Image (cartoon, rainbow, N blue to C red):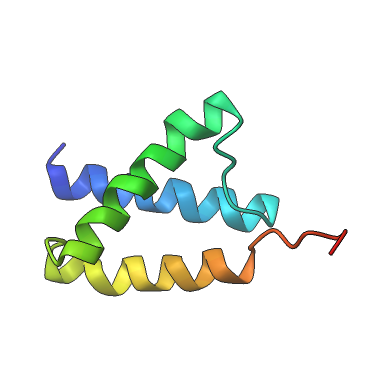
Amino acid sequence: MTQDERWIAKYNEVVGFIESNHRNPSRHNLEERYKYCNWLKHTKKQFNAGNLKEDRVELFEKLLVLMEENKHVNQWT
């Protein structure tokens, strides 16, 4: 499996998690942190630094929009 195939597979896992649970992965849940949050954090750093490959930028921007739509809203504010 190439690096591009692994990146696409992890991207699809994260999108599937958000769509099925209607929320973003929690950094407080160890399983979600190691499966999804660390990948998101690393990829976001690459994106912000401009080091993300061109073909991945559009996909990651779509993921950021999906994450914003499913952002946790504090009900007590």
Does 14 appear above or below 73? above
19 or 69, which is in the foreground? 69
Taking the image as shown, residue 32 lies to the left or right of residue 40, namely right
Q: Position of residue 23 (x, y in %)?
A: 66, 54
Image quadrant assignment for residue 63: bottom left
Does 54 appear above or below 44? below
65 or 3, which is in the foreground? 65
Name which residue lies at 34% across and 42% down: 39
Taking the image as shown, residue 48 lies to the left or right of residue 17, namely left
Name which residue lies at 24% across and 63% down: 47
Query: Which residue is most to the right?
Result: 76
Image quadrant assignment for residue 44: bottom left
Query: Which residue is most to the front?
Result: 77
Q: The C terminus is located in which quarter?
A: bottom right
Name which residue lies at 61% across and 29% down: 29
Q: Position of residue 45 (x, y in %)?
A: 26, 54
Q: The N terminus is located in which quarter?
A: top left
Image quadrant assignment for residue 76: bottom right
